[in-house]
Image (spheres, rainbow, N blue to C red):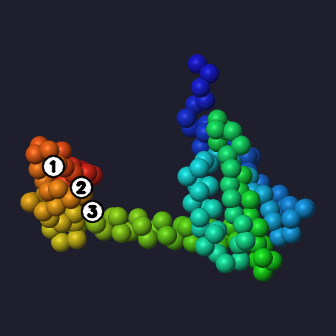
Amino acid sequence: MNAIQRHEIYVLDDGEKPIEVTEDTKIPNAATIKVLKQDHTLGNMLRHQLLTNPAVLFAGYKVPHPLEPQFQLKIQTDGSVTPSAALEKASADLIGALTTLETKFRREFSYREIDGGDGTGAGGLGGVGQGEVGMDGVGAAGAYGDETAWTGRDYLDL
């Protein structure tokens, strides 16, 4: 088969650098950063985080080809910081945000374990599925009178 092995898409080869920075000679305070073995997931998160920095004038990314696991990130700053420094700050901020998200996620599921796994206790998915309105706003019976409504026990039920 001609398909690439799945691990080859994300695992760097020996001696392969994950990032290549190319300073732009035509645009001041700009650089193109090629990130290997990553895809839209990281590219879009970095772009969004870069745009929260007031020193960043432009941040965008593109994937040159859908079968190549890489993206190119273009950054232009106002000159108070370099594009590389802006990327480092955005990466650190993104890691912090994801760490906070992971902590909150683990805490919510630890509440679920304490409550006995039914999702009805303090801090868990609280009360959904016990006659209260679920996600679709029609109650546990669903819009058509059957069990089609989402309840807390159906989603992420471990």
Q: Quick check: 137 above or below 6?
A: below
Asked whether 132 or 91 is in front, the reply is 132
Disc 1 residue type (three-letter): Gly
- How crowded is the residue under tag 1: few (<14 C-alpha within 10 Å), some, or many (20+)? some
128 lies left or right of 75? left
Q: Are marks 2 and 1 in contact (CB under 8 Å)?
A: yes
Q: Which mark is residue 109?
A: 3
Q: Position of residue 104 (x, y in %)?
A: 36, 69
Q: Quick check: 70 above or below 55?
A: above
Element type at mark 2: loop
First in sequence: mark 2 or mark 1?
A: 2
State the residue at coordinates (33%, 64%). 106
State the residue at coordinates (27%, 62%). 109
Q: Which mark is residue 142?
A: 1
Asked whether 95 or 25 is in front, the reply is 25
Disc 2 residue type (three-letter): Asp
